[in-house]
Image: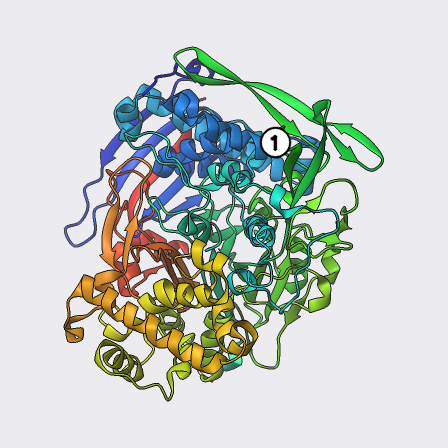
C-alpha cells in the first residue's frame, strides 16, 4: 500500500477542537456538546444531532448553512467522501497503488470535460456558491483533523494515506455515479445478433412495449467486443480495497451485468381525501446497492431562505428527496435511454482517425499523468470522438467503440439539480424546478400543505431519428441525436381523480415520446396500486407496511402455468408446496425458498436451452424475469409445434431441479425450509468487514425489493433509505437509513438502523425545533476562528 504526501494543510487557518460533556438532569438524556473553531464562518452555526443520528443544522446565512453542511458531512462520512472523490476523479492510484490505474483511467474517461461556466449555469443561481461553501466546509474539517489526528476515521491510518482537499468543481465533474441506460443492454443484444439469435435474445433482454429489434444498416454486430464494458464497469462499480487489491472483472459474468441493471425505487403520494388525517402522505424508498455506509445521508438544513430535511448524496450540498415545511418530494428512476454505443471504422493508415461522413475525423487525445504513489506516475492517453470517450480500440479489426451519453452534457451531475427544489412552494414551482433537471432521469412525486399531490418526469433525453437505441450504431454520421426532448413534452399529473399517484420504474409514459424500451415489468407497481386503491383512509402505518410488503405478484403470472400438471416424487412435492404457497416472500417461507430458487436459477436456463443453443450455452440464470414470464405466456411463439407439451416438460424438469437444489442447501424435509436461510443481506464496506450477513425477506418483484445474485441468493440492491412523510404534521414523519447515518466505525450511528430496516421499523424524522431539542444527543457549535 503506498503513501502520499499530506495535503497543504497550511492553506487552512489554524483550527481548534474542544469537547465538553454537559451535566444533565438525571431524568433527561445527557447531551454531549462540542465546539469547533473554524476558518470561513461569518456567524456561529448550531448542529443538533438527534437519537437517530440525523444532524439538524441551524445557520443565520445560506452561505454558512452550506459551509456547515460540508463540515458535518466530513464529520460523519469523511472516508466515504474521500473515496467517492478519488474514484470519481481517477485518483485511487495515488493513495492505493498502481493496481488501481485502470480504475482511474476509466473514471477520467467519463469525467465532465466541457465548459465549466455552462456547467454551473445549468444548475441555476446559487448552485456554484453552494458548492464552493460546501467544499470549503469539507476542507475546514480536513484541516481540523490534521491538528487532531485521533479524530480522523481509522481507515486513513490503516490504509496509510490522508484525505484530499476538495475543489468546488469536483462535485460536478464526477459523472460515473449517475444512473443511466442502456449501454449494457446494447452490448448484450449485439452478442445475440452476432450469433444470429437476435430474435431469441428477446427472451433475455425484453422490451416494453414489445418491439422488433433490427440490426442498424452498416452495423456488424460481431465488431462489438464485450471488453467494451470493462472501463464502464470499473468506473461505476463500488471500489474494494481488500488485501488482494483491485478486483478483476469478468465482463461476461451474468451477476455483474445484472447488478448494473438492478437499480429501482418506489414512491407514492396520497391525496388528503384518501388518508385518515385529511393530510397528504408521501412515501419513498430508492433502491440502490446495499453497502456501508449507506449511499444516502439524511440532513436538516435550516436557514433564512429554506428549512428543508431529507436525504441526498453525502458529497452534495442540499438534498434530493424530503420536504421543506411546505412541499414534499420523492423520486424514482425513469428508465429513459440516455446512452448509445457507436462503432467506427478506423483509417487503415492511422488508427487515430475514424470514418465520418465522406471522410476521416481525428480523435482527440488527452494525455494525463496519473500519480501512483511515492512520487511515481503513469502517463495515459484518453481518446475521444465527436460522440464521446473511446472505450475499446482494435487495430487488427480496424474498429473502435465509443459511448455517447448525456453525461457529457452540461448539467448532468447526478442529483445536484435537487438544489432547485429546496424552496419549492407549489406544484408550478415544482415543475419549473424540474424543467432543467438533466440527470439521472427521474419520476418525482409531490405533495404540499395545501393538499395538492402530483407527479412529474424529468431528465435530458435524446431524440433519435432512424434507430431505436437498442443496438449499437455506426459512428459514421448516419445515426446522430436530433437534440433532446423538450421538458414541456415530458408527462406530469396534478390531483388525479384516483386520489393517489405512484411510480415503481414501470413504463408510465406515452409510447410516442421515444424515451426507451427497457422498463421494470411492473409487479411492484401492480402491488402498490392494489393496496392504495383498496384503502380510502390510509394511515402512515399503512404506507410503512406497504414499503415492507413481501407479496410477490409475479407468482400470479407464473404459477398458473402449473395448473393441470401432475407428477410423483420431488416434482410432485414441489407442485404441492407452490400450490399451497401464499405468494409472500417472507423469511420463514418454504414456498418462497422454492419459488425464488426455481425462477432465478432453473426455469429461465431450462427454457433458454429449448429456445436457442446460444442462450442455453451462455446463460445459467434468469437474466430478465419480466421478459421470461411474458415468453412463457406464449410458448408456441418460442417453442414451435407441440409447444404446450414442451412447456410442460420444461416446467416439471426445472421444478425438479429446483427442488433438488433447495434440498441440497436446506435438507430434504421441506417443512424445515426457510427463504431467509438462503437469502441474505450484507452491507459491504470497501475496507472494513461487512455488516452481516442477515436473513432477508423479499425478492426482486416485491415492494420491499431485493434483487439478488442467483448464484448464492445474496442481495444486490434494494432499499436502504425509506421515508414516510405526514405532510403538514411534519414531526409525525418517519425514516430509516441503514446501516446507519454515520460512516465512522466508532460512531454509535454506524450500524444502529440495520435491525430497523430488516424488521420494518422506523425512526422519527423530526422537523420542528422544539421536537429536535427534546431528542438531541449531540450538540455541535461551529464558531469562526476569526
How far across and how far down the image is residue 460, in percent?
67, 50
The residue under the point 25% across, 51% down is 752
How far across and how far down the image is residue 601, in percent?
35, 62
The quadrant in which the C terminus is found is top left
Q: Quadrant of residue 762?
A: bottom left
The residue carrying mark 1 is: 393
The quadrant in which the N terminus is found is top left
Q: Residue furthest bottom?
A: 564
Pick the front one: 589 or 476: 476
Q: Residue furthest right?
A: 358
Whether 485 is drawn above or below 385: the answer is: below
Q: Is residue 174 visible in the rendered structure shown here?
A: yes
Near mark 1 (Cα within 10 A), the count class, few <14, some 14-19 or many ≥20, is many
Pick the front one: 543 or 385: 385
Whether 46 is drawn above or below 615: the answer is: above
Whether 472 is drawn above or below 17: the answer is: below
How far across and how far down the image is residue 286, in percent?
45, 57
The residue under the point 30% across, 54% down is 775
Tag 1 secondary structure: strand
How far across and how far down the image is residue 473, in percent?
69, 47
The residue under the point 16% across, 54% down is 27
Pick the front one: 7 or 508: 508
Q: Quadrant of residue 39?
A: top left
Amino acid at each position: 500500500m503506498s503513501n502520499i504526501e499530506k495535503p497543504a494543510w497550511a492553506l487552512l487557518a489554524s483550527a481548534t477542537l474542544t469537547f465538553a460533556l454537559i451535566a444533565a438532569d438525571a431524568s433527561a438524556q445527557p447531551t454531549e456538546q462540542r465546539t469547533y473553531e473554524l476558518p470561513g464562518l461569518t456567524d456561529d452555526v448550531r448542529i443538533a444531532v438527534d437519537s437517530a443520528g440525523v444532524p439538524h443544522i441551524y445557520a443565520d446565512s445560506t452561505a454558512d448553512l452550506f459551509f456547515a453542511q460540508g463540515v458535518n458531512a466530513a464529520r460523519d462520512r469523511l472516508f466515504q467522501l474521500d473515496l467517492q472523490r478519488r474514484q470519481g476523479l481517477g485518483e485511487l492510484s495515488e493513495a492505493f497503488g498502481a493496481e488501481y490505474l485502470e480504475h482511474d483511467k476509466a473514471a477520467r474517461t467519463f469525467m465532465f470535460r466541457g465548459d465549466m461556466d455552462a456547467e454551473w449555469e445549468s444548475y441555476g443561481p446559487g448552485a456554484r456558491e453552494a458548492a464552493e461553501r460546501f467544499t470549503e466546509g469539507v476542507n475546514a474539517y480536513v484541516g481540523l483533523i490534521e491538528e487532531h489526528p485521533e479524530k480522523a476515521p481509522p481507515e486513513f491510518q490503516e490504509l496509510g494515506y490522508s484525505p484530499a482537499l476538495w475543489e468546488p468543481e469536483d462535485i460536478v465533474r464526477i459523472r460515473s455515479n449517475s444512473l443511466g441506460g442502456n449501454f449494457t443492454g446494447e452490448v448484450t443484444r449485439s452478442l445475440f445478433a452476432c450469433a444470429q439469435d437476435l430474435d431469441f435474445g428477446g427472451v433475455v433482454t425484453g422490451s416494453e412495449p414489445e418491439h422488433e429489434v433490427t440490426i442498424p444498416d452498416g452495423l456488424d454486430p460481431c465488431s462489438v467486443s464485450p471488453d467494451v464494458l470493462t472501463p464502464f464497469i470499473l468506473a461505476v462499480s463500488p471500489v474494494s480495497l481488500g488485501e488482494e487489491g483491485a478486483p478483476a472483472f469478468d465482463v461476461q459474468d451474468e451477476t455483474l451485468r445484472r447488478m448494473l441493471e438492478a437499480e429501482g425505487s418506489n414512491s407514492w403520494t396520497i391525496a388528503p381525501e384518501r388518508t385518515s388525517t385529511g393530510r397528504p402522505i408521501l412515501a419513498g424508498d430508492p433502491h440502490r446497492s446495499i453497502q456501508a455506509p449507506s449511499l444516502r445521508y439524511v440532513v436538516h438544513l435550516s436557514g433564512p431562505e429554506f428549512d428543508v430535511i431529507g436525504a441526498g448524496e453525502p458529497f452534495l450540498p442540499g438534498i434530493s428527496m424530503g420536504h421543506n415545511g411546505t412541499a414534499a418530494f420523492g423520486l424514482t428512476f425513469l428508465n429513459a435511454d440516455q446512452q448509445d454505443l457507436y462503432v467506427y471504422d478506423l483509417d487503415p493508415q492511422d488508427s487515430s482517425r475514424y470514418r465520418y461522413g465522406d471522410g476521416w475525423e481525428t480523435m482527440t487525445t488527452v494525455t494525463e499523468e496519473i500519480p501512483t504513489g511515492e512520487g511515481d506516475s503513469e502517463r495515459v492517453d484518453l481518446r475521444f470522438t465527436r460522440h464521446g470517450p473511446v472505450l475499446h480500440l482494435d487495430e487488427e479489426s480496424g474498429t473502435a467503440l465509443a459511448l455517447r451519453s448525456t453525461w457529457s452534457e452540461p448539467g448532468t451531475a447526478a442529483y445536484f439539480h435537487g438544489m432547485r427544489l429546496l424552496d419549492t412552494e407549489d406544484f408550478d414551482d415544482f415543475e419549473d424546478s424540474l424543467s432543467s433537471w438533466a440527470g439521472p432521469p427521474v419520476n418525482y412525486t409531490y405533495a404540499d400543505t395545501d393538499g395538492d399531490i402530483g407527479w412529474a418526469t424529468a431528465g435530458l433525453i435524446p431524440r433519435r431519428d432512424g434507430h431505436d437505441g437498442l443496438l449499437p450504431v455506426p459512428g459514421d454520421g448516419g445515426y446522430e441525436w436530433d437534440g433532446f426532448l423538450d421538458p414541456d413534452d415530458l408527462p406530469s399529473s396534478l390531483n388525479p381523480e384516483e386520489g393517489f399517484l405512484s411510480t415503481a420504474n414501470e413504463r408510465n409514459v406515452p409510447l410516442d415520446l421515444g424515451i426507451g424500451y427497457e422498463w421494470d415489468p411492473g409487479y411492484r407497481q401492480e402491488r402498490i396500486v392494489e393496496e392504495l386503491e383498496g384503502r380510502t383512509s390510509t394511515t402512515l402505518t399503512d404506507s410503512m407496511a406497504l414499503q415492507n410488503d413481501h407479496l410477490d405478484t409475479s407468482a400470479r403470472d407464473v404459477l398458473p402455468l402449473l395448473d393441470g400438471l401432475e407428477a410423483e416424487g420431488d416434482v410432485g412435492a414441489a407442485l404441492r408446496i407452490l400450490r399451497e404457497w401464499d405468494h409472500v416472500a417472507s423469511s420463514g417461507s418454504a414456498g418462497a425458498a422454492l419459488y425464488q430458487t426455481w425462477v432465478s436459477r432453473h426455469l429461465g436456463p431450462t427454457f433458454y436451452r429449448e429456445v436457442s443453443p446460444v442462450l442455453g450455452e451462455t446463460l445459467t440464470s434468469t437474466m430478465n424475469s419480466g421478459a421470461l414470464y411474458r415468453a412463457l405466456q406464449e410458448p408456441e411463439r418460442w417453442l414451435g409445434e407441440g409447444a404446450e407439451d414442451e412447456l410442460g416438460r420444461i416446467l416439471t424438469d426445472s421444478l425438479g431441479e429446483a427442488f433438488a437444489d433447495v434440498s441440497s442447501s436446506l435438507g430434504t424435509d421441506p417443512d424445515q425450509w426457510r427463504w431467509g436461510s438462503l437469502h441474505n443481506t450484507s452491507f459491504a464496506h470497501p475496507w472494513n468487514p461487512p455488516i452481516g450477513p442477515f436473513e432477508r425477506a423479499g425478492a426482486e418483484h416485491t415492494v420491499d425489493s431485493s434483487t439478488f445474485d442467483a448464484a448464492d441468493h445474496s442481495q444486490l440492491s434494494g432499499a436502504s433509505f425509506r421515508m414516510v412523510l405526514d405532510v403538514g404534521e411534519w414531526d409525525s414523519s418517519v425514516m430509516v437509513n441503514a446501516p446507519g447515518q454515520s460512516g465512522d466505525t466508532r460512531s454509535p450511528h454506524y450500524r444502529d438502523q440495520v435491525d430497523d430496516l430488516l424488521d420494518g421499523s422506523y425512526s422519527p424524522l423530526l422537523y420542528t425545533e422544539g421536537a429536535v431539542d427534546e431528542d438531541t444527543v449531540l450538540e455541535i457549535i461551529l464558531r469562526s476562528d476569526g
